Image (cartoon, coloured by chain):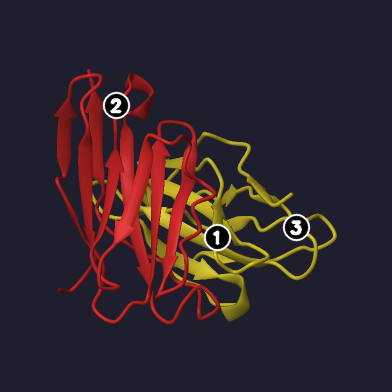
Chain colours: A red, B yellow
Amino acid sequence: GAGVSQSPSNKVTEKGKDVELRCDPISGHTALYWYRQSLGQGLEFLIYFQGNSAPDKSGLPSDRFSAERTGGSVSTLTIQRTQQEDSAVYLCASIPGGAGAAGELFFGEGSRLTVL
Amino acid sequence: AQRVTQPEKLLSVFKGAPVELKCNYSYSGSPELFWYVQYSRQRLQLLLRHISRESIKGFTADLNKGETSFHLKKPFAQEEDSAMYYCALKGYNFNKFYFGSGTKLNVKP
């Protein structure tokens, strides 16, 4: 596709339910990031995938959060037993050639999660 | 620790007035700094990066290592500049980009 694609664009769920958010990066981009955008909090780094290397999970806020990237392309962020504080916009970004390259992140439009 | 600080949550100026969005960073070594912008109903996108020393849409940003700042400036603001602006730092291990909390710029007619 022409850009980073995320789905769903909006998700409303009840507290305690599990949710999956999907990211389809730009074809050929080897690095993929997940960020969380909360009102007044800026962008919080969650996880980073680079090729076949082990992901950098250091930003995941709790063990309820996990992510995988299949075949070096599509990524899924899973939040188990959602809590109200998980409500935010979850942004995916990809970058060609890894983060050591030119440095421009290409963002998706985000998935807005609302936990009731 | 690597950190990016944007002290202003909201900045309102009139059209034609100069604008400066502040960004300070904490980093040891030579930083790579960026400004990203998010217009209403659009995705976050790169505005400019310090290594390019470019001017985009009339905006410039100069890296001041002594003051650890990377303020974004434009001499004459336009209404279409109204957006959310994020300052970002590329970290030590090149994996992470650290973002500030963002400044919402509102340019009034």
- Disc 3 is placed on an element classified as loop
Residue B11 lies, in percent from the top left, at 51, 37
Chain at tag 3? B
Residue visible at 58% across and 36% down in the picture: B8
Q: Chain of mark 1?
A: B
Q: Which mark is residue A82?
A: 2
Quadrant of residue A31 within the rendered picture: bottom left
Q: Which residue is mark 1?
A: B96
Identify the disc placed on residue A39: none
Q: Gap in Å between the C-alphas at discs 2 and 3?
A: 34 Å
- Residue B108 position in % (x across, y down): 38, 39
Of labels 3 and 1, earlier in sequence is 3
Mark 1 Cα shell of 10 Å, populated few (<14), some (14-19), many (≥20): some
The answer to the question of whether label 2 and label 1 lie on touching residues, with beta carbons closer than 8 A, is no
**Which numbered circle lies on residue B27?**
3
B86 is higher (above) or lower (below) than A40: below
